[in-house]
Image (tube, helix red, strand yellow):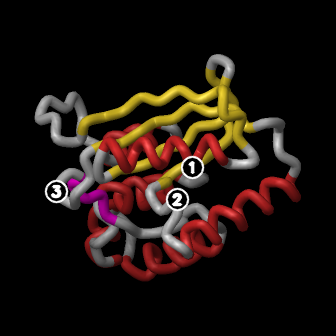
Amino acid sequence: MKNSELKLISELMKNSRRSDRELAKAIGASQPTVTRTRARLEKEGYLREYTVIPDFHKLGFELASFNLVSVKKNLSIEELKKAQQIQLKNMAVGLAEEIVLFNRGLGGSYNAVVVAFHKSYSDYSEFVGKIKASQFVDASAMSSFIVDLADETQYRYFTFSTLAKYLLTMSK
């Protein structure tokens, strides 16, 4: 990836609301170049979405949970698609909307992580029940780390700004 593309992505991660003109000034390129590059990066899937990172506590969430789980087996592509379809159906009827990330990975005896936000501890408890009831998850293998979003002592707020700066070191 070109250094100019990394600079553009980095600037967008810091603030995706800026105009192409402002971005061009920030990375030292012309506005038409930024517009073309952004369109190409979107088309190629480097830029998935533009969003904001709100204060989740002010929005009514008390907890964030990081849940290590074990799927019953490594899912085939077909089974993964089925699991995704079930997730989309659940979201359509108001179930599992709190999940912001569910990916396979490695860690201890677990092979997946589920990150979610909850309005209360009882909502979190219901969420755990839904995860354990899933046909794809081993109910006996789950461990959670819960973050109190009301805790005013935060070491670092959730942001992509630091990652945006780090991204620029990758081209060197």
**Looking at the image, residue 57 lies above or below residue 21:** above
Could you say which disc has been placed on residue 156 in the image? none
Amino acid on which disc 2 is placed: Ala
SS of the residue under disc 3: loop
**Which contiguous range is marked in magenta?**
52-56
Amino acid on which disc 1 is placed: Lys
Question: Does the magenta run of residues contain 154?
Answer: no
At 48% from the left edge and 54% from the top edge, which residue is drawn?
100
Answer left or right for 169 relative to 113: left
At 61% from the left edge and 52% from the top edge, which residue is drawn?
1
Residue at mark 1:
130
SS of the residue under disc 1: helix
Residue at mark 2:
96
Residue at mark 3:
58
Q: CA separation, marks 2 and 3? A: 21 Å
**Looking at the image, residue 155 lies above or below residue 20:** above
User: In which quarter of the view is residue 18 placed?
Assistant: bottom left
At 16% from the left edge and 56% from the top edge, which residue is drawn?
58
* Residues at discs 3 and 1 in contact (Cβ within 8 Å): no
